[in-house]
Amino acid sequence: MLARPDGEGAAAVADAAGVAAVGLGEVDVDDGAHAAIANARAANAVVRGRNPAIVRAGHAKLVVMSLIALRRWILPNVVDLVAPDGIPPLVARVLAARGIETSEMADFIAARAVEDGPPMLDVDRAVERLRRALAARERIVVYGDYDVDGIAGSATLVRAFRQLGVAVAAYIPNRYEEGYGLNEEALRKLAADGARVIVSVDCGVTAVREAALARSLGLDLIITDHHHPPADLPDAFALVNPRRPGDVSLDKELAGAGVALMLARRLLGELGFALRRDELMQLVALATVADVVPLRAANRALVRGGLEALNRAPLTGVRALVERAGLKLGHVNASDIGYVLGPRLNAAGRIADAEEALRLLLTEDAEEAKILAENLEKKNSERQELTRQVVKGARERAEERPDAWATVVADPAWPAGIVGLAASRLVEDHGRPAVVIAIDGEEGKGSCRSISAVHIAEALDECDDLLIKHGGHAMAAGFSIAREDIPAFTDRLDEVVRRRLGGVRPIPSLRVDAEIEPDALTSRLALELASLEPCGAGNPRPHLLLRNVKVFGIRQVGADSDHLRCKITVGRFTFDAMAFRRGEHMEAMTDAGVVDAVVTVGAGLRGFVELELRDFGPVGTADRMRLEAVVA
Ligand SMILES: [Mn+2]
């Protein structure tokens, strides 16, 4: 179904703009920030000069008065393509436009996992140590992150150990009291409680000091992680991370839970794994979509298989969560995870403690599951309200430096669990990397979101001397900083981003997969396109160009009236359609009555085809984009 306009979440489809990975405890998938429209406002910068209807009102605030496309559309080259047997022509065109060879199309559609390839570095060493611990009844503790990836990845390992007849505890640090990742106090406490082996999930690759401490405490630390490794790796008993230099395993884009699954699978062996496959796979599907890693190759196979298991044989807690959120088992898809389930599982850790979300994924008790799901529902509403407040404040603050290359804003009133969501919005607003810092006493916790042209974790590496701790991915990262260093960091990051962009501000664009004839838009076509699911990061729903379509019944929806709902007549049919973050275009669209539009096709609540308008402009926009591409 189409993503909801109620400020639910954004990640599954964090795609068009190339928005990808997320990390360092700020994984969110979230919040009305429909990434489809990522960078939309920034696009005004592109057209500002040409369109007199866009005026600059006061301080960098753009008021759009006429209908105009917000992004540069990159139109596909029309090529002669013979679709392989059994693959509908449009699907083949979409795949070809995305660089998939004709010979690979059938495997892609089937979401078949590629061959296994060599194991990750250290994974066998880790398995051997865990077997020894099991045989000697040594205490093992799983240590996860507080986001969906960390929680579901921890649940994956705990459930794998259950298969081996051992009850292993999972420890999730508190975001507010302990912060992200392994910490010394927790390690000391776990050691004092008798733990001998710690297995981290979705964290640890930067924990150099903590690994040394673990060693001195007599703890064998097995790190499993997928974050960008620093130059100096921690000296752990084992370090399993596909991004680690020298690691020759094939799947570099796994989520943290995906890495944990690879360990679980080798630990269980094929029979043990087969017995737990349904539960482990659905956990990994939740994590993989919620962590916004690209849904290609192994991730695609994991999410397809996990969703199938989730719909057919949901865990007790997953069933409760799905039902309380108003979704229908049997029909849960990747976008539902991104917009509905992910934000709920994340809400606990953002507001208070991730403990409840972990318990939900581990319980076999339906009554307990109901109560936990209810609590998560409440926390998620609270989280939405907090997000609205922080975003409002962060936007005001951002306007103080309209010409910055990176937005950096900070405030003591902002909770650390929410700043990542606000950063995502600021990226959309300005089309440049954004950093939002929650100040707590003399320290700030920053969350970064970026654009595809700036690897933000590497940019932070260049600010290393100003930061206490930092880490993350290309598109998302986090750090802590002394309060007094924030001004110097702001200047440094600005300089780093400007240099990394070569002094050129990037233009937000929208890649069109195919133009379609109006008559082709049928429910059968929607079914054909569904073969591309799971869609989301790295494999967006196809962007289809429709020229000259009639729009009517346009109204604003959403808490702040910032989205549009309308009807579109295409050929012989009329469809419901949704345009996120385009509320301000209601009048212009109504006046125009006819538009060129780039849409995605989804199935609505009642199974009817629904369209999402990813961008639209006056009739002739598509021609203009083609022409400009030639000139450029
Ligand atoms: Mn992760």
Image (cartoon, rainbow, N blue to C red):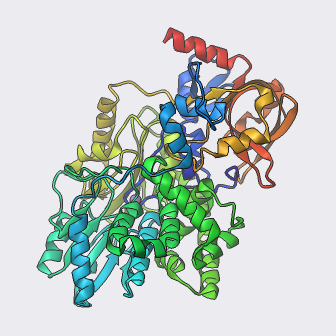
Viewed as shown, does residue 149 lie left or right of 517? left
Q: Residue at x 11, y 78 (%)?
A: 216
Quadrant housing residue 628: top right
Q: Residue at x 52, y 49 (%)?
A: 111
Q: Is residue 94 above or below residue 534?
A: above
Which sits in the foreground, 424 or 540? Answer: 540
Q: Position of residue 246 (x, y in %)?
A: 19, 50
Q: Is residue 381 above or below residue 499?
A: below
Viewed as shown, does residue 130 lie left or right of 89? left
Which sits in the foreground, 158 or 579? Answer: 158
Q: Is residue 332 above or below residue 295?
A: below
Which sits in the foreground, 94 or 458? Answer: 94
Q: Position of residue 176 (x, y in %)?
A: 40, 71
| Direction top: furthest residue | 631
Q: Is residue 594 visible?
A: yes
Q: Position of residue 615 (x, y in %)?
A: 65, 32
Which sits in the foreground, 357 or 275? Answer: 275
Q: Residue at x 14, y 75 (%)?
A: 215
Quadrant housing residue 225: bottom left
Q: Position of residue 79 (x, y in %)?
A: 57, 19
Query: Which quadrant of the picture is home to ligand 1?
Result: bottom left
Q: Is residue 70 visible?
A: no
> How many labels, in total?
0
| Direction left: furthest residue | 216
Viewed as shown, does residue 102 lie left or right of 256? right
Viewed as shown, does residue 32 lie left or right of 416? right
